[in-house]
Amino acid sequence: MPPRFFLSACEASGDAHGAQLILELKKIFPEAVFFGLGGPRMQRAGLQLLEDMTRFSALGLGDVLRQYFKYLKVFKRALRAIETESPDAAIVIDSPAFNLRLAKKISPDVPVLYYISPQLWAWGARRIRDIQRRIRHMMVILPFEVPLYEKAGVSCEFVGHPLLDEIEIPKDREALRRKMGLQAGDLAVGLLAGSREKEVRRIFPVMLEASRQLASLKPGLKFFYSRSPNLRFELYEEQLQAFADFRVPVSELPYHEFVHALDFAFVTSGTATLETALLKTPFFLVYKTSASTYFIGKRLVRVPYLGLVNLLAGRSAVPEFIQDKAVPGVMAREAKTLLENPEISEKMRNDFEEVRILLGEHGASRRAAHSVQNFLRKIGKV
């Protein structure tokens, strides 16, 4: 009988990584059945989708609480499906606030594997106990996560970072810039405000104001913003209405091509910062959340940086403008300095290359699929 897999991914990035994992698992188990929670990419890859989780736009503790009953309904539906289908394994992807709770409720008869680890290095021991109790095998994408799990006695394997498979640096950057209407000598600045509605509402106006001030400090710059495909176009237009004297067009290029064509970008904290680094575009990290979420997080998180690029580099390779420090005037002046001093951009690109090397080789999704296969063999499921 072909193996049956339950999968759960709650974010757009998890949907992308989950889709690649399904495709690689299909190569090993051509007749395998996949069902669970995810998004359109996982569905196209072959997942029998119980719920499109990418439509939930929660950001922060308060927002999660407001959507509690929606999540509870999905939670119960997933557990019923697992009980009915009795999968050979459940694979949860990132999103620990939802997935760790789900893992604790799944029957012990169903082994739970975790792909893309919760940030234990940020949250300390609070989550390791839940993982020790219910997660049978971890597949991590950051090299420094392995010793944390080994110390806790949790089965763990470093598979590399899936972004290395998903990002291919375009060969003809100048052709992309011409598509954007840029001429030789133009400097292009991008605004990458995130993939969640709450992020766009809080952070896009800060980026717009910083860009407006930057345009005054350094006339002639060309500004563009990128729209997340899972968000309404009108959401961005609503924010732009407050900047009638400073119109910023949306990029029509595919996201990775757009980012690579830029000379500089303001980027919301998250996967996009690592994508931007891998595409070799200098950037500043920008992040704002609700006061309550920031207040709680500041007391729980135990790392010196928010951005993965800085955490991997072990130093401040990229400036971080977080919460009260996300001051448009300061951001504009710092950006002007970077754009007028090519050596700063070159230093960033060198740091980005160091980070890329630390992330391992291409083939993370393939190695994750083989890690699943080896685990199932170990417990006699295949």
Image (cartoon, rainbow, N blue to C red):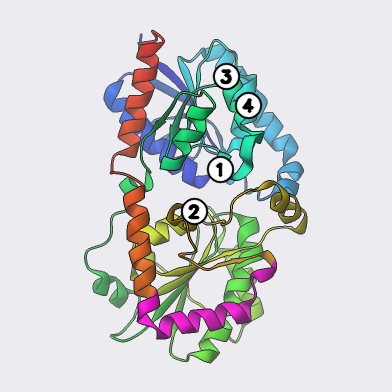
Q: Give above or below for 90 relative to 336.
A: above
What label does residue 121 carry, if any?
A: 1
* Residue depth check, mark 3 versus mark 1: number of the one nearer the observer: 1
Q: Is residue 160 magenta?
A: no
Q: Which residue is mark 3?
A: 81
Nearest to the eye among marks 4 and 3: give it: 4
Q: Position of residue 212 (x, y in %)?
A: 57, 83
Q: Amino acid at mark 1?
A: Trp
Could you tell me what secondary structure mostly forms the magenta stretch?
helix
How much space separates mark 4 and mark 1, taking CA atoms? 15 Å
The residues bearing labels 1 and 2 have C-alpha atoms spaced at a distance of 10 Å
Residue topped by disc 4 = 130
Mark nearer the N terminus (4 vs 3): 3
Q: Residues within 10 Å of mark 1 (few under 14, many from 20)?
A: some
* Real-space Cα separation, disc 2 to disc 4, in angstroms: 24 Å
Residue at image coords 43%, 17%: 4
Residue farthest along the left direction in this orientation: 171
Residue type for callout 3: Ala
Extent of the magenta region: 324-344
The residue indicated by pointer 2 is: 311
Pointers 1 and 2 in contact (C-beta within 8 Å): yes
The answer to whether residue 342 is magenta is yes
Instruction: Report the mark closest to the observer, 2 or 3.
Output: 2
The Cα atoms of the two marked residues, 3 and 1, are separated by 33 Å
- Is residue 92 toward the left or the right of residue 63 in the image? left
Expressed as whole percent of the image width and height from the top left, the position of residue 235 reads 61, 63
Mark 2 residue type? Leu
- From this view, report whether residue 82 is shown above or below residue 73: above
